[in-house]
Image (cartoon, rainbow, N blue to C red):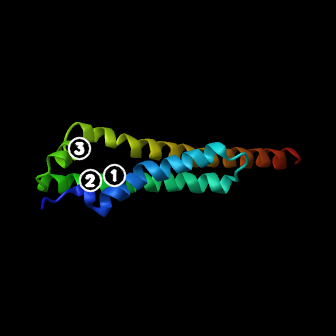
Amino acid sequence: MTYSVFIEVRFWLLVLFSLILPFGIYWLLLVKRAISPFSVLLFGIVLVVIAGIDVYLLRTLSSEAKLNHSLAADQLFNSELSIAFYLLPAMAAGIGINLVSHILIRHLTEAEQRFEQEHSKR
């Protein structure tokens, strides 16, 4: 029997963390009519963490595919095609960072406005 990385739990975790969870979060953010800033911040942090998990899983599966003699795994994880897999975590991290920075910028803008109002009364 030949060993394949496609039957490993790590491969299915990669699918979960690369596709299902991020696109589920994107969908939820798009369909919500009202969402708290804390929830947006939390989703942003989760997307950055998901991106980190993705990169870890891609690296471990890639190193395992090198040791494996499966042609499909080798072509998928050790070829030029594997670079495309890193676009999904990059997108998740980029969107997550933008969400976090949006909340921080909004908070700082409001804090500056409060500061100006308090000091303009004096």
At x 48%, y 53%, the residue is 21
At x 72%, y 45%, the residue is 33
Label 3 sits on residue = 76
Secondary structure category for the residue under label 3: helix
Residue 3: percent from the left, percent from the top?
16, 60
Whether the residues at callouts 3 and 1 have beta carbons within 8 Å, the answer is no
Q: Amino acid at mark 3?
A: Leu
> Mark 3, residues whose alpha carbon is within 10 Å: few (<14), some, or many (≥20)?
some
Whether the residues at callouts 1 and 2 have beta carbons within 8 Å, the answer is yes
Residue 29: percent from the left, percent from the top?
62, 46
Label 1 sits on residue = 55
Marks 3 and 1, how far apart in space?
Answer: 15 Å
Marks 2 and 3, how far apart in space?
Answer: 12 Å
Query: As drawn, which residue projects farthest toward the right?
Result: 121
> Where the N terminus falls, by quadrant?
bottom left
Marks 1 and 2, how far apart in space?
Answer: 6 Å
Query: As drawn, which residue projects farthest toward the front?
Result: 1
The numbered disc on residue 59 is 2
| Left or right of 11 on screen, residue 121 | right
For the question of whether residue 60 can be seen, the reply is no
> Mark 1, residues whose alpha carbon is within 10 Å: few (<14), some, or many (≥20)?
some
| Left or right of 49 on screen, residue 66 | left
